[in-house]
Image (spheres, grey):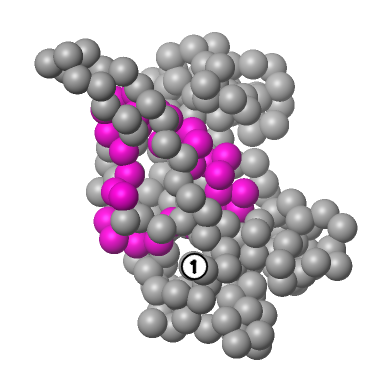
């Protein structure tokens, strides 16, 4: 299948900090499902992390305690994300960060992404296809590729930026004869994280 015709779910999370294993949690998740770079569906929600927000996190993403006070919790929102993804390929810029949070929070509920769900990292794409750029953070790559940057560090804004950037990166890859989804996956995919959570269900140990 041509890479441009593949169904992708581009997603991003905003969090209370950098380390899910140290207690940081998702406060916002957004995703856009695209095919042939036309929007198929949209998923967007604030999440109440049931913990205090740090001053640094609020400074970065401008999400306040008041904004999340009445928001649904992760166990209400994130299982819906699994259904939203369906059989699509996940995409994100530095997607390992977002996947670490998503997969860890799902594991706390005894859930996980489908084993067959692939994940493509546009940061990996940018570093490979644009090695001459000094800094490959999202806004820098977008600027270099001629994508207008209006807002960053909110989940949906970063998703929309990644969608526009990815289209240009796929065009560059195509000129290097990396044209099919199989080729894109071979060069730019990452392995989904696995978290081992002990659940007291009939004395069994489950790994997620």
Residue positioned 27% across, 41% down in the render: 80
Q: In which quarter of the image is residue 118?
A: bottom left
**Residue 108 location (% of width, % of height):** 34, 23
Residue extending farthest left? 202
Residue 48 in view here: yes
**Residue 41 location (% of width, % of height):** 34, 60
Does residue 91 show up magenta in the picture? Answer: yes
Residues packed near mark 1 inside 10 Å, few (<14), some (14 to 19) or many (20 plus): some
Asked if residue 101 lies left or right of residue 154, the reply is left
Asked if residue 185 lies left or right of residue 198, the reply is right
Residue positioned 66% across, 57% down in the render: 123
| Residue holding disc 1 | 185
| Magenta extent | 86-115
**Residue 146 location (% of width, % of height):** 75, 71
Q: Is residue 159 above or below residue 19?
A: below
Q: Quadrant of residue 106?
A: top left
**Residue 96 location (% of width, % of height):** 56, 44
Residue positioned 57% across, 40% down in the render: 97
């Amino acid at each position: 299948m041509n890479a441009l015709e593949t169904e992708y779910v581009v997603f991003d999370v905003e969090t209370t900090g950098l380390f899910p294993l140290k207690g940081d949690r998702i406060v916002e998740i957004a995703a856009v499902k695209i095919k042939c770079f036309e929007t198929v569906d949209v998923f967007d929600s604030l999440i109440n992390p049931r913990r205090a927000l740090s001053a640094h996190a609020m400074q970065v993403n401008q999400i306040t305690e008041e904004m999340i006070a009445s928001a649904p919790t992760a166990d209400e929102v994130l299982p819906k994300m699994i259904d939203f993804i369906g059989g699509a390929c996940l995409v994100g810029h530095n997607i390992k960060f977002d996947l670490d949070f998503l997969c860890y929070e799902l594991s706390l509920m005894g859930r996980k992404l489908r084993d067959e769900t692939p994940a493509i990292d546009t940061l990996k794409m940018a570093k490979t296809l644009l090695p001459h750029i000094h800094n490959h953070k999202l806004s820098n790559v977008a600027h270099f590729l001629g994508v207008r940057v209006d807002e960053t560090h909110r989940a949906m804004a970063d998703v929309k930026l990644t969608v526009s950037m990815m289209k240009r990166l796929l065009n560059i890859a195509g000129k290097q004869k990396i044209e099919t989804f199989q080729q894109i996956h071979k060069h730019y995919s990452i392995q989904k994280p696995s978290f081992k959570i002990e659940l007291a269900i009939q004395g069994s140990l489950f790994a997620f």
